[in-house]
Image: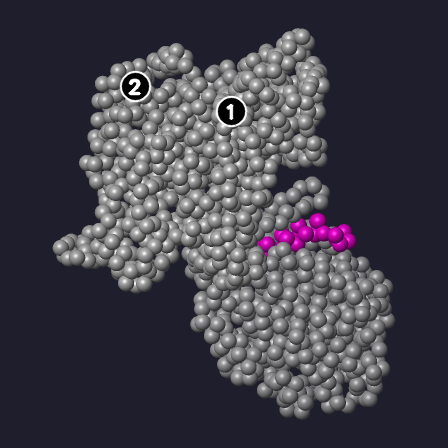
Amino acid sequence: MAAVQSGQIDTEEEKEIKSETSNDGSRNNSSNDGRPLSVSPGTTSSGGSVKSSSGTTEEQQTLLAVLQFLKKNNLSESVEILRREAGLSEESEDQKGSESSATGSGAGNKDMGGGDASSLLSRVSIASSPVTAVAAQAPSKVGAGDDRPDVNVVLSAYSQQGDPALYDVYYSGLKKFIESVLDCHRAELSQVFYPLFVHMYLELVYNNHESESKAFFEKFSGDQECYYGDDLRILSSLSKKEHMRGNETLLDFRTSKFVLRISRDSYQLLKRHLQERQNNQIWNIIQEHLYIDIFDGMPRSKSQIDAMSGSLAGEAKRDSNKAKVFYGLLKEPEIEVPLDDEDEEVENEEGKPKKKKPKKDSLGSKSKKQDPNAPQQNRIPLPELKDSDKLDKIMNLKEATKRVRLGRDTLPSICFYSFLNAYQGLTAVDFTDDSSLIAGGYADSTVRVWSVTPKKLRRVKSAADLSLIDKESDDVLERIMDEKTASESKILHGHSGPVYGISFSPDRNYLLSCSEDGTVRLWSLQTFTCLVGYKGHNYPVWDTQFSPYGYYFISGGHDRVARLWATDHYQPLRMFAGHLADITCTRFHPNSNYVATGSSDRTIRLWDVLTGNCVRILTGHKGPIHALAFSPNGKFMASGATDGRVLLWDIGHGIMIGDLKGHTDAIYALKFSRDGEILASGSMDNTVRLWDAFKAFDELETDDFTATTGHIHLPENSQELLLGTYMTKSTPVIHLHFTRRNLLLAAGAYNP
Amino acid sequence: MADREERRFAEVPRESVKLVAESAGVELGDDVAALLAEDVCYRLREATQSSSQFMRHAKRRKLTVEDFNRALRWSNVEAICGYGAQDVLPFRSIKEGELFFVEDRDINLVELALATNIPKGCAETMVRVNVSYLDGKGNLEPQGTVPSAVQTLSDDLLKYYQQITRAILGEDPHLMKVALLDLQSNSKMAALLPYFVYVISGVKSVSHDLEQLNRLLHMVKSLIQNPYLYLGSYVRSLVSSVMYCILEPLAASINPLNDHWTLRDYAALLLSHIFWTHGDLVSGLYHQILLSLQKVLSDPVRPLCSHYGAVVGLHALGWKAVERVLYPHLPAYWANLQAVLDDYSVSNAQVKADGHKVYGAILVAVERLLKMKALSLSRPAEGARGPGAGRQDPGPPPGHRVSSPGLSPPPEPLSEAALGIASHLQAGGAGCPWEAWRPVPLPAMYGELYSFFGDSLAVRFSTGPGAEGAGAGGAGGVSPPRALPQLGMAAKDPPPGPAHPDTARKMPQLTANLSLSPRRDGSPRATGPAPPSLAATGLSRPLARSSSSSSSSSSSSAQRSRASASRAGQRGAGPSRDVFPKARFTAPPAGGGAPTFAFLIGGRQMGRRCQGRRPFLTAFAPAAPAPPSLTSSSSSSSSSAIATAPPPPAPPLPSLPPRTYAHKLPVIGRVSKPVHRGALSHYSLHLPL
C-alpha cells in the first residue's frame, strides 16, 4: 500500500523525513531513535533482516555507507547523531540514558510514581545499551534502503538472464529429476519448487518476457502447494516490470532469502544433478535467493515438512531458535497474610470453612521456589506494587481458591456477551482481569466501556469540586467520584479511524486502544478521558496489549514493526523489526520479559524485551495469524490463524507441538484457562471450541534429538483433544476470557 | 493452483479506458488504452488485496467500500466518496453505449445540514450476557438461534402501539383522526415502524371491508408524512399494500353499492404521494410497478375495476407513465372497453357502468398526458423560436417540472423527485424489456387519441387558450394543440398565424389549468357519454376515424364556436358539453346547462377525494333539490384542495341556478337504464356511480 508512489514523490518525502529525524535528534537527543524507523514498511523490514543476520563488519560497512549518504545530503546533524550512536563508547550511551530519562517524562506524567518511573527507565536504557546500538542499525538501513536506486539494485538482481524460452525446460527438467529421485528425498527436494518457481517467474517478468512469463505461470503454478495460494495470486497479478516496483510482496521475496531445510544427502543429490546438467540458471537462483539450511541425518517426511512450511519466507533457520528463553514465571511477591486471614475469618463465618488454608499454602509455596527457567526477578525493571495492587492480588488469591478445577470431565460454563445493535462494527473487545469491565473498540473510531457488575461507571469530580472535598475522611476515594455521571457505559472519543485493538491495564485504571489512524491512545478510566496519544506507527496499528505487570505495553501494525512503550514515555523503548508483513497481533509473555508477535507473513516471532532480539521464529501457519495466547505457566503458546488451525508451541525448544484442526474460519480469539488445562478458541465460524491442553502438553516428551534438529512429530489425531464445540447465536467470537474462577466469557457482535 | 484457468481476473476493457479518457477530453490510441487498461487492472487488484486486510482486522467477512477507501487512502490515492451506503447500488444500463452507470443525484447539502427530521429511536448499542453452556454441556437454548432482544421495545412504546392501532381501527372517527395526526407527527416511534407496516399489510385480509381498508390507507398516509420516520426498506411493503388496494378486485367491489372506486382513487393518490415524497427510496420500484400495472391493463380477464385501478395508478405515477404504458395499450384495450360500452343489455348494465368509470379515468389520464406533453414541448420552444415546430423535439428535458397529480406534495423534494423519476423512466426505457418504445410526437398522439375520444378530448385540450382563440379566429378552438392541423384533419383550416404566439403566451395559464384538470376531469367518467359518440361515428379503429373526422369535427367545431362565447368564463365545462351533442338523444340546447353540469360533477369528484362521496349519493337520490348544497360544498373543497392552482372556474359556479343541474341530471342516468326504459330520469339516480 505504501509503495504505490512515484519516484519523484518518494525522494521528496524522503527529504522531509530526513529533516524530521534530524530535528528530532537535535531536540531530544534521545537514546531511542525509533522514529526514523517508521519511514516505510518495506525498507524497515529490510533493515530488520539485515540487522538480525549480518555480522559486525557488515554493519560497519553499511554504517559507513549511510554516513556518506547523509553527508552528501547535508544532513550533518544526523551524521553526528548516528556516529555518536553507533560507533561509540559506553559513557555516551550512559549520558544519553540519563538525558532521555529527564526529557522523556514530559509526555505523560501519570501516577506511575514520577521519580520511580524515571529511575526505572534509566535502568532500562543503561542495561540495554547494546540494544540501542542494534536499534540504531535500523535507521541506518533506512537511509540506504529508502534510496530508490537501492531498490533498483535489489530488482536488478534479476537482470542477468538466460534464454526465456529455456526457463520452461529448466524447470520441467528439474521437476522430472525430483520426481525420479528416491521417495525419501523427493519430499525434501520438492520444497525447492516454490521459491524457484517464484524467482524464475519474477526474472521473466523483470526482463519483459510477458508472454513467456504468463505461459510459465500457467504451466507450473498448479504444481505449487495449495497453502501458497495467496502469494501466487499476488504474483499472478504481476505481469509487468513496472508492477514490480513498489510491490510489497515482491520486495519481501527480494530482500529476504527463502529458507529451506534440507538434509545433507538430499542437498548433495540436487547439487550433483544441477552441476551435471550445467544448469546454471537454476543454480544461480539457488545461490542467490535461497538459503538452504543443511542438516545431517535422516531426510524429513512430507508431513513434517508441510507442518513447518507455509510462511512467506520459508522455514525459520535452526539457529534463529537456539537462543535461551527464560519462560518461567517471576516469583510472586510476598503478600502479608494477616489481611488475608482477616478476610478469611469473615468468610469462615459465612460458612465456607477449611479447604482454604492448604490451598493457599500450596500457592504460596509454588511462588516461593525459584523456577530455574525463570528470568531474574529484576531482568527488566517492573513497577512496584501499590497498595491497591496488593489488594487486588489478595482478591485474586481468594478467588483462585474458589476456582473450578477444569479438566476433561469438568468443562467450563460459558457466558456469551453479545454486542447488540452494534451498527458501528465491533472490531475489538477486552475484559479486565477481574471481569468487572468490558470494552469494545468500534469501526466508527469510538471505544465504549461497560460495567459488567452492578457498580456503575463514575467519573472523578472536576478539579473545582475536588478541592472542596475533605481529604482526611475515610471514604475519600468514594467522595471524589461524581455520582451524577454514573452510568452503565461510557464512550471514549478520540481516534480518527477504526479501533483495532484495546487492552485494559492490570490495575483497571487505564485502557489502551490502537487504531487505523496510526496512534495508540491511553485512556484514564477514572476520568474517562484520553491521557496520551502515542505516535510512532505511521500506519494502522493492528494490536496493542498491556504487560501483565502494567507500565509497559506493546503495539504492532502495518509498518511491520512492533514497538515497546512505557506509559510515561511518548517514544517507544524498543522497536522489534523483522517481520516481512504486517504485525497482526501482539502478546506479552506472562513474565513480561518477552513479547510474541504474529504477522501476516505467517510467522510468529518472540522478542526479548531486554535485548530487543528476536529469539524465536515459529513457522507453520498457512494464513495470517490473528490470535496468540501464552499458557499461564509460560511454557507454551497457542496461535490461531485465518486458516482455521490452532498451533501449539513449546517456547523453550521453539518447536511446534500440536496442530488443532476443527475451525472452519479465521480464529480471532484464544485463551487458556487459569490453570492452563483447557484452551478455548473462538472463531468467525460462530463457534467456541474447547481443547484439552493438559493432554496436549502432558503427553509431550521432547527428546534431545527433536530439540536439536527441530524435527517435529505431531500427534496424528487432533480430534482427541477437542473437548467440545459450542455454537453461538450466529455471532462471530472475537474475544475470550476466563474469569478468576474459570468461567469462560466469550464476546462478539450480533450482526443480522 | 489447478483452478487458475477458471479464476481469471476481472479486466477493464480498453473501450472503458477510452471512454473515460474521452470524458476527460483526451483522445487515446488503441495501444495506449490497452496499456492503461492493463495498469488499471493491476492497480485495482493491488488495492483490493490491501483492502482485504482492513476487512480481516475489522473481523468481518464482507469487504466494504470503506475498506477499499482506506486502502486507497493509505496508498496516497484519493478515496471515492458517495458509495458508503449499506444498500446495493443498482447499475443501470444504456443499451446503445453498452454502458453501465450508477444513478447519481445531486443532493442539496444545505437542506441536509439544516434538516431537523433526523430519524430517532435507533436502538442503542448494548451488551447483553447470557449463560450459554453450563459446565460445558447444558444447552439452555438451542444452538445457533438468534439473540432474543436485538431491539427491545419499551413498555411505553408497546402501549402507544396498542392505543394507536385500536384508535385507528376502532369505531370512533374522532379518535381515529387524533391517532392519525399523532402518527403523522410523532418523532419517537421509529422502533414501531415495522409493527405498523405489518398492520398495514393486513389489507389483504380485510378486502371485504371498505371502511377498514380506508383506515389502513390513512395510516399509510400518516406514516409517509411523518418527517421523523425513515421508511427505508419498509416503503416497499407499504407500496405493495397500496397497490393491493388499487389493483385487486376487492371483495368489497362485488356489491355495487360499495364505493370502492373512491378507495382506489385514494390509494392511487397515496401511491403518487409516495413517489413524490420518497422518490429516492422507491425509484427502484418504479419500473416494477409500471410493469404490474401494464400487466393488469393488458389482461382482459381482469374485472373492470382492476383496469380502473391500473389507469388511475398510471395517472398517479405521472404523465410519462401514461405515455409509456397506457397510451401504447390504448388501441388494444379500446376494443374491449367499447364492447362493454356498446352492450345495452340489462344484464350488462352494471358492467357497463364500470366501463364508463374506466373510460372516464382513461380520458382524464390521456388529457393530462396531452397537456403535459404540449407544455413540455412548448417550454423549450419558447426559448428557441417562437412559432417554430417545437413539438417535434424528441422529448422534453427529463427534469421538467411536472406538477403533482394528486395531493399537493411537500414543496422541496418535488423537483428533485420529479427529476429522479423521470430520468429513471428514461433510463429504464432504454434498457427495458418491453417492446421498443419511442416517443410519439404530440400531433400523432393527439390524432390517435382524438380518434378514440372525439371532441371531448379536443375541447379539453384547447380550453385554456381556446377561449380567446375562439374569439379571434374561426377555428380558433383547436389552435393550441397545433397538432390538429397537421393531423390530416383536412377539413380544418390551419390556424391563423397569430395563434402561435398566442399559444406560447398562454402556456402558463395552461399550467394552472392543468393541475386542476385531473381532478375536474373525473367527471366524464361518471357521466360516461362516450358510447353515443362512438355509435354516431361508427368507428372502432383509430385510423378509420380520420376519414369520418371531417363531418364530426366540423360539427363539433361549429358547436364549439357556438359555445365558446358562453364558455369563455367556465372552461371546465367544455368536455361533457361536447359529448352530449353526439349523444343518441337530442343534443342539449347548447350553452350554459351542460358545461356547468360537468363542472359540478368535477367538483364533486374533488370533494369525493377528500371526504368520500356518500354525501353526493344521498344528496342525489332526490334528484332535484340536492345539488345546490352540493355545489357549494364541493366548490369549497375543490379550492381548498388545490391550493397551488388558481381556480378559475370557481366564480361562475355558484351563480348558476340549481335548476340546471336538475334538468341535466337525467343525462347521467341515460348511461344505463334509461336508454331502454325511456327517459325516466329518477331511475338513473339510484345508479351507483
Kind of element beneath mark 1: helix
User: In the rendered image of this protein, does residue A451 appear above or below residue B28?
Assistant: below
**Which of the 4 image quarters holds residue B639?**
bottom right
Tag 1 residue: A705
The chain containing the residue under callout 1 comes to: A
Q: Is residue A399 visible?
A: no
Residue at 39 percent across and 33 percent down: it is A327
Taking the spot 56% from the left edge, 13% from the top edge, the residue there is A287
**Which quadrant is the C terminus of chain A positioned in?**
bottom right
Asked if residue B419 is among those painted magenta in the image, a careful observer would answer yes
Q: Main secondary structure of the magenta part?
A: helix
Colour option used? one colour
Q: Position of residue B7 (x, y in %)?
A: 68, 35
Q: Which mark is residue A105?
A: none
Is residue A645 or residue B679 the one in the foreground? A645
Percent across and percent down for residue B412 are 50, 59
**Could you tell me if residue A711 is visible in this image?**
yes
Instruction: Identify the mark nearer the N-term, 2 or 1.
Output: 2
- Amino acid type, residue under disc 1 in the picture: Phe
Give the secondary structure at mark 2: helix
Using the image, determine if residue A98 lies above or below residue B416: above
Range of magenta residues: B418-437
Q: Which residue is mark 2?
A: A85
Point out residue A630 in the picture as x, y percentages from the top left corner: 43, 39
**Is residue B82 in the magenta section?**
no
Chain of the residue where label 2 is placed in the rendered structure = A
Residue visible at 57% across and 36% down in the picture: A715
Q: Amino acid at mark 2?
A: Glu
